[in-house]
Each structure stands twice: as C-alpha cells, then as structure tokens.
Amino acid sequence: MKRKFIVIILCIAILSACAGIFVGCNSQEVITVSGSSSVTPLMEVLAAEYEKSHDVRIVVNMSSSGEGISDTQNGLNDFGMSSRALKAGEEGLEGVTLCMDGIALVVGKDCAVTDVKKTDVKALFENGTPIPGTSITAGIGRDTSSGTRGAFDELMGIEGSYHQNIATLAETGNVIEAIQGTVNSLGYISYGSLSNAVKAVTLDGIACTYYNIINNVYSLQRPFVIVLKEGKTLSDAAKGFYDYIMSDEAQEVIAREGYISIK
C-alpha cells in the first residue's frame, strides 16, 4: 500500500512538471511577419539570429508585397514586408526602409545572352517582341500583387498589363525554376536571390552588382520596406524584434547576406 502511494505521488509530480513545461512553451510570445517573397529569405535569417538570444518565436509568412500590406491594414500580422515603396493610395500605413535591393535580369545558365537593352526588355514585356539578335523570345514576370513587379514596371516604364505571351508567377522561386534550363526566356528577380541556378545579364552594359547598386549606377533598384499600421502600438516582443532589424547589428547581417545596407 505504501509503495502504491509513493508511485501515485511520483506520477503526480511528473505530470505537474510536464504541465509546467507545456505552459512555459505556450507562454512563449509569437511574432508574425508576412509579405514579399523577395524579402522573406532575408527576414528568415534575421528572425533566426534574433531567436538565438530571445525567448520568442518569429513566424515569417511568405506571400507577396500586396498581401503583406493588406495583412498589416487588417491587423493580421505584427508588421508586413514589401519589396517596393508604399503607393499614395495605401493609406493608414507607414513604410520604413530596411535595406536596398536590385532587380536582376536573369536567363538560363546555358543561354548565350549576356547583355540586353532597356528598350528591348520593355518591348518584350509590353508587346511580346523578341529581343533582337538574341534567342530571347519569351518573358517571365511576377503577378500583379508582387512588389518586385511593381518596382520593375515603374523603373522600366511599363504601363498596363503584360503581353499575353508573358508568364506571370507568384513567387521569386517560381521564376528561378521556370528560367532554369531555358535558353529563350528572360525574367527578373531580387538581386539578393541570385544563385548559380540562373545567370544575370547586364542592362545596357551595366551589371547588377553591389557596387553598381550602392552607387546608383544600375537603374533597376528599389527598397525593401517594413510596413507598419499607423496608430498601432507594437507588442513589447514585436517592438524588440523591430528595433533589432533596424539596428546596426542587423545591418551587418543584411550586408553579409548580400543585400545593400542603408547604414
């Protein structure tokens, strides 16, 4: 009987300890950031760095700049991510520049094209016109909710819809996958997302490089923006993370990851 009583006491102690651990896990604060697929890889790195020394969990939901802005307006995140500056009609929001980025024009690794002209790229996306003297007959862009597309169209002077032969995809990774292995397509992605999977071409003889972006030589560049809702007070946890990503420490991480620090 005494042994049975001891066993019961031990079981209660174990259950209590487990319950304490469970409650402790549930009490961990969650920070939600959502938006641009171009900004997402960088935000995930910043989140991982911050979580190393803070008892929070940061959820980074990848979608598009448009959805990140909409989520912020509707209170569905702590703050949003956009790969373009806010537009005049997007009221009730504040956009704060996190860093700068370029928009790289990319082709398949086996494509012989190394340089394109801005006027020809514009004609390709607007009218479906093949780029003269090259194998490029098709374009691959982003859908209308994409901040990268918004910035690309504005910088290229493209108005209205793309030509019907231009494929429009939801995310940066989709564009990279579609460009791989082709020799007749040209697309655009974030400079920070460049990899060996695709080849960047020069625009009017100017390469999309860190030096050319930071010195305003390369024309296709835009900000990565943190989107805040005006009048909304961030929780202590979210404010801590926000202050971190705007700090000199985070800017060193940003530069290390290949993006253009603003400090």
Image (cartoon, rainbow, N blue to C red):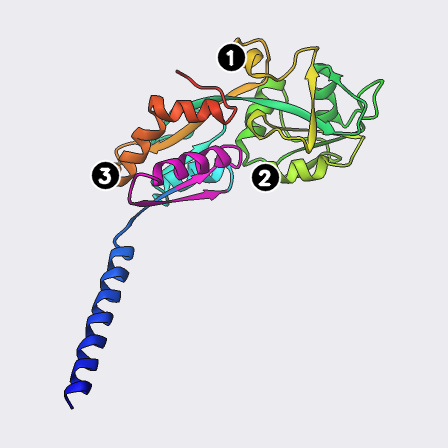
Is 120 displayed left or right of 98 in the figure? right
Q: Position of residue 152 (x, y in %)?
A: 59, 24
Q: Residue furthest front?
A: 3
What is the magenta range?
A: 33-62
Query: In the structure shown, which secondary structural element does the residue marked by tag 3 occupy?
Result: helix
Q: Nearer the viewer, residue 8 or 248?
A: 8
Name the residue nearer the viewer: 83 or 159.
83
Q: Is residue 163 left or right of residue 17?
A: right
Read off the residue under disc 3: 236
Residue at 22 percent of width and 62 percent of height: 20
Residue 135 position, x and y percent, is: 84, 25
**Foreground disc of the pair 2, 3:** 3
Dot 2 lies on which element? loop
Quarter of the image with the C terminus in it: top left
Residue 214's mark? 1
Front tag of 1 and 2: 1
What residue sits right under mark 2 in the picture? Answer: 171
The x and y percentages for residue 224 are 46, 26
